[in-house]
Structure formats: C-alpha cells, structure tokens
Image (spheres, rainbow, N blue to C red):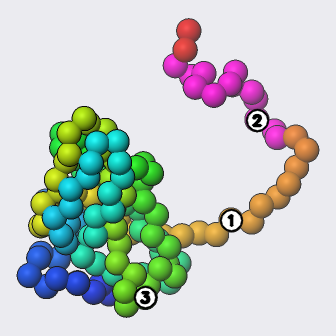
Amino acid sequence: MKLKIKLFDKTLPSPEYKSEKAAALDLYARQTTTIQPGEVGMVPLNIAMQLPKDHWVLMSARSSLHKKGVMMANGIGVGDEDYCGDNDEYRAALWNFTQQPVTIERGERIVQMIVMQREPVELEIVEKLDGKDRGGFGSTGSK
C-alpha cells in the first residue's frame, strides 16, 4: 500500500518500521514539549497524510512511553480518512501522571501508527439478541 505523507520538518526521520516484523510505524516528536504534572500536552508528530480510500490510522503509545511518566490521554488515537489537509498535522495528546514536569524531546519516538482498512457497518436494530448471556462485563475471568 502506498501512503502519501507530508513531513513538517524534513530534518527528522520519516515514520519507519524499526524491525522487519514490526506491526506499526514509529512516529517522532517534531518539537520539544514539556508537560506539567497532571496536565495534557499536545505533541506534534511531524506528519500529515492522505490515506488510501476506506482506510484509517490507529495510533498507540510505544510500549516504553510510560517510563517517561506520560501516557496517551485518550488511550489511543484515531485518524480518519478525511483528516487529510496540508496542515492537518497528527499530534499525540499525552497526560503527565507524575508529580514532576516531563519533557518530550524533539526527535523522540513516542507513538506508533498502524494503517487499517475501514469497513462501514450497517446497523440493524433488534429487540433481542440470539447469544447466551455471559454474566456481565468482565465476567470471563472472575470466580
């Protein structure tokens, strides 16, 4: 699949797979950003993109991000196909869960991106479902 991307700072690396079997592309912070304790900071990721028809982007934290004292504020990020303007730079909303300021350095790998195919669903409203009740949310692991 071909993906058209725009880099805002061409001196930083392009998104890349860091191993032959990596599932996601690593994205880099475009600028140094300090996030105060308990606050959310928006870190620009140096790319805008034009996704192929019927595709979307899933952004997740790199597995080591928590070691810095931050996590993605919204759990994951979703990039829609129509977020594709020349200035629609992707950003990561990071929450500082520590008691100290946390600095994300320019060029640091902080999130990863997977391009996924989108298949629209057609909803059918019913009064009853055919499946058996399982006992409530989170019930498969409880005793």
118 magenta-colored: no
Q: Is residue 70 left or right of residue 11?
A: right
Looking at the rendered structure, the kind of residue marked 1 is Val
Asked which quadrant contains residue 77, the reply is bottom left
Please tell me which residue lies in front, 1 or 47: 47
Which residue appears farthest toward the bottom when viewing the image? Answer: 86
Q: Earlier in the sequence, mark 3 or mark 1?
A: 3
Q: Is residue 139 magenta?
A: yes
Name the residue at 33% across, 62% down: 42
Task: Report the predominant secondary structure element of the magenta stretch.
Answer: loop
- What's the amino acid at mark 2? Gly
* Residue 67, horizontal then vertical, whole percent: 18, 39
Name the residue type under label 3: Gly
Q: Position of residue 32 (x, y in %)?
A: 16, 64
Residue 136 visible, this orientation: yes
Q: Earlier in the sequence, mark 3 or mark 2?
A: 3
**Which percent across, then down, holds residue 30?**
19, 72
- Taking the spot 12% from the left edge, 60% from the top edge, the residue there is 105
Q: CA distance from mark 3 to mark 1?
A: 26 Å
Give the labeled residue for mark 2: 131
- Location of mark 3 (residue): 85
Give me the C-alpha separation between circle 3 and circle 2: 44 Å
Q: Which mark is residue 16?
A: none
User: Closer to the camera: disc 3 or disc 1?
Assistant: 3
Could you tell which of marks 1 and 2 lies nearer the N-terminus?
A: 1
Quarter of the image with the C terminus in it = top right
Q: Residues within 10 Å of mark 1 (few under 14, many from 20)?
A: few
Residue 7, percent from left and from top: 23, 84
Query: Which mark is on residue 121?
Result: 1
Distance of label 1 from label 2 (alpha carbons)? 20 Å
Lateral position of residue 13 relative to residue 114, left or right? left
